[in-house]
Amino acid sequence: MTVITRFAPSPTGFLHIGGARTALFNYLFARRNNGKYILRIEDTDRQRSTENAVKAIMNGLSWLELSGDEQPIFQYSQQERHKQVASTLLEQGKAYKCYCSAKELEEMRALARREGKTALYDRRWRDRDPATAPSNVAPVVRIKSPLKGSTTIDDLVQGRVEVKNEQLDDFVILRADGTPTYMLSVVVDDHDMEISHVIRGDDHLNNAFRQYQLYAAMDWRAPKFAHIPLIHGHDGTKLSKRHGAVGIDAYKDQGYLPEALCNYLLRLGWGHENAEFITRKKAIGLFDIGAVGKSPSRFDIKKLDNINATYMREMSETHLYHLLETHLRKNLDVTLDPIKLERLHRGLSGLKVRAKNINELASSAMIYIVSPPINMDEKADSILSKDARQLIRGLLEPFNELTNWNKTKIEEILKNFATDCDIKFGSVAQPLRAALTGTTSSPDIFEVIEILGKEEVVQRIEAVC
């Protein structure tokens, strides 16, 4: 059997972080088994589906390198095929037309709830003569679910799950306006696309038992199911906006690396021994859907920050420099001349160890880009008192006289200056850092001074003194 998986998002909004993990698991399972991974856009809800949402999903998957192996399939384009299957089921007596009014449906649902039943429709039109149908009601089409016995699914994650058939509705497969429902469309598409494994969130587990009835009615082989637990927030509730960003586009905008985000999502519910950092290539060789846990995982932004920071530190400086330069040119109103670019390149190793994402890296890199006078943050401004400014002005002469501009000589000047002034080194270094960078936090001060160069250092000191 050829393994074929699919990721099937509805284009009603952004690509959710949970959806991205589902796409990743489908991708890895297909690659692990030398199979195929397909993207299907489930756009049958015409009122809520938008082109912007399609674009957001496609862009998010492309950024994560999780686009399908083929051009995406749009479910709405298969609508006639879905209707054809519904007609076949009607002709074979495996489905029927239901003429219940909205009022009747609400009354029977209310009664079922009072009696504690899960099947809310009482099947009143299942064996009724269509000749008695009211002329003013457009019928829906319902599947004839089995009335006795049970349905069992051997889920690859949840294990064996069984539901008594009496708990299942004769659910609608065609609406009154003739459009197919999600339940029908999904089954037909999965069959026609030869999907071998349906890997999705466990909020679809109940749907699986209903969809199984359609496979049985059409004498189709059902795929294997794997329902993975949802991602929860730090408080154990379903992940939502109140926990922070839930859309992939937000994490991209915040400067996270796609490979780091995928590594983190991979470890949300799946693991290999104690390995924390797993590359895409390694993950393909290790991924086992049966190793996915049954319990929800909690999204931990601090752990994501740690993984992302590690990826940045271990990334080649050439690639990281390219990402930094691209970000600066695209997002910040700065002029990057050759001198500033050289400073960025030389200062990158000192900057990257302090940043958790590209945004932070870009923010800290501004110390090599801005021109004097530079803006001071609140802490830096408080350090630069009148006396502090007077003090660091005394560095202008030794800096101007220094001919061999390197860290060793710069360190020597600063330490000698502190000794001559009979003050601690920090009393010189702190206001000098503030004057040169506009902040109280930066890479090694000797490194910063060396990279900025004599002319720039002198100009920045003069600008505050």
Image (tube, rainbow, N blue to C red):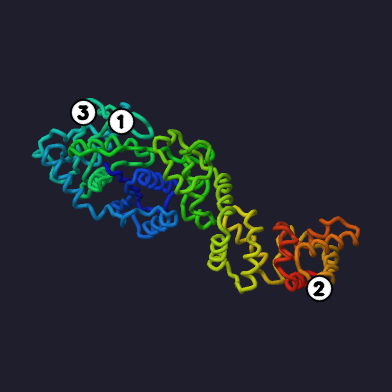
10 Å neighbourhood of mark 3: few (<14), some, or many (≥20)? Answer: few
User: Tag 1: residue type?
Assistant: Thr
Residue situated furthest left in the rendering: 131
- SS type, badge 1: loop
State the residue position of label 1: 118
Which amino acid type is marked by label 3?
Leu
Q: Residue at x 13, y 33 (%)?
A: 127
- Tell how many labels: 3
Residue 213 point in image, percent of width and height: 23, 35
The CA span between labels 1 and 2 is 84 Å
Q: Earlier in the sequence, mark 1 or mark 3?
A: 1
Viewport quadrant of the C terminus: bottom right
As rendered, which of 1 and 186 lies closer to the eye?
1
For the residue pair 131 and 34, the one nearer the viewer reads as 34
Q: Residues within 10 Å of mark 2 (few under 14, many from 20)?
A: few
Q: Amino acid at mark 2?
A: Asn
Residue behind mark 2: 400
Question: Left or right: where does residue 93 sit relative to residue 115?
Answer: left
Q: Nearer the viewer, mark 1 or mark 3?
A: 3
- The residue identified by callout 3 is 147
* Closer to us: 13 or 432: 432
